[in-house]
Image: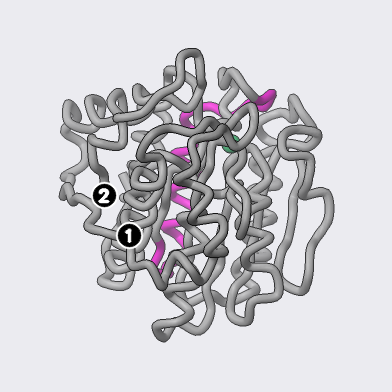
């Protein structure tokens, strides 16, 4: 199991904000103190500007340096542009590792799946996964699928990948919930699976499995997973019901695809996040 992380990503925070440094530091502690998985640790290098510009406008990239909040959920921080770029670099590194046949997880913040071409929102500044998918397509991979199991709709990833040849997007999310999109399919390649709040675990798993069945039909050569752990029963900002064993099950299912795959951390705001990530990683590793 390869984990791409950089402890420096804990270097910004806003008091009371759910997207907080402990999400990473607690997970690092959990992973360092376990013996079930052999972990190869890696640090992200730096993100190629051309790769970032495939997904975002120059205006958006410039805006990240302007010291004004983006919206009520998405504060400005000094150096947020650099933190966001580091997260992108981890995504690009994860892509390389997946291509080299490794089981790999990007453990970074900020997350990315709400960031659109021209807007930071929902705690996200640059869209890590979309940038990695576009990089994959630009460098020889013909068919890439995104599987987004974060409890929120990956509106940014959808906006960036809609109707892009070779890409397909599958999002399973609570609706109604932030950001309020994802009720129907978009373009020819974005497939949304909204789930009502408080949907029982078994029924939620059925939807996760149905989305995975649709993804298989696309026959991807590579799968990029937006791994958010906020569909957890005790997550403070959503109203779903999954338990740690469901994330373990999901890891096993994704492993079962038998396709090169990388996962990037998106959301997950409960103090149990380290256990949820660990359960998922064990599933991915076949343990
Ligand atoms: Zn989320």
Which residue is painted at 56% across and 31% down in the image? 230
Which residue is painted at 52% across and 64% down in the image? 58
Horizontal and vertical percent for residue 29?
22, 25
| Front residue of this view, candidates 28 and 121 | 121
Picture layout, residue 103 above or below residue 151: below
For the view shown, which residue lies furthest in the top direction? Answer: 16
SS at mark 1 in the image: helix
Tell me, for residue 4, which label it has, or none.
2
Residue 44 forms part of the magenta stretch: no
Asked if the residues shown at circle 1 and circle 2 are in contact, with their CB atoms under 8 angstroms apart, the answer is: yes
| Front residue of this view, candidates 27 and 59 | 59
The magenta segment: 238-261
Among numbered discs 1 and 2, the one appearing first in the sequence: 2
Horizontal and vertical percent for residue 223?
48, 65
Which residue is painted at 64% across and 41% down in the image? 205
Horizontal and vertical percent for residue 250?
50, 45
Residue linked to disc 1 = 94
Picture layout, residue 30 above or below residue 207: above
Horizontal and vertical percent for residue 200?
71, 28
Tell me, for residue 213, which label it has, or none.
none
């Amino acid at each position: 199991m390869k984990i791409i992380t950089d402890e420096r990503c804990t270097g910004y925070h806003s008091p009371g904000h759910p997207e907080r440094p402990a999400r990473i530091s607690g997970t690092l502690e959990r992973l360092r103190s376990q013996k079930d998985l052999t972990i190869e640790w890696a640090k992200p290098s730096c993100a190629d500007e051309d790769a970032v510009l495939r997904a975002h406008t120059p205006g958006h990239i410039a805006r990240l340096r302007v010291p004004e909040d983006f919206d009520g959920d998405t504060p400005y921080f000094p150096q947020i542009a650099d933190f966001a770029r580091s997260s992108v670099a981890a995504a690009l590194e994860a892509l390389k590792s997946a291509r080299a046949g490794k089981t790999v997880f990007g453990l970074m913040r900020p997350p990315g799946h709400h960031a659109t071409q021209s807007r930071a929102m929902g705690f996200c500044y640059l869209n890590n996964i979309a940038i990695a998918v576009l990089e994959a397509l630009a460098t020889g991979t013909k068919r890439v699928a995104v599987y987004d199991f974060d409890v929120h709709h990956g509106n940014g990833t959808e906006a960036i990948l809609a109707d892009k040849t070779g890409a397909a997007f599958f999002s399973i999310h609570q609706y109604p919930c932030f950001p309020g999109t994802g009720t129907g399919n978009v373009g020819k390649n974005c497939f949304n699976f909204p789930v009502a709040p408080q949907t029982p675990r078994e029924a939620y798993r059925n939807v996760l499995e149905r989305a995975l069945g649709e993804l298989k039909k696309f026959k991807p050569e590579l799968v990029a997973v937006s791994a958010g752990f906020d569909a957890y029963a005790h997550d403070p900002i959503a109203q779903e019901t999954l338990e740690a064993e469901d994330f373990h099950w999901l890891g096993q299912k994704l492993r079962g695809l038998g396709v090169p795959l990388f996962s990037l951390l998106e959301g997950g705001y409960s103090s149990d996040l380290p256990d949820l990530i660990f359960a998922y990683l064990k599933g991915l590793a076949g343990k």
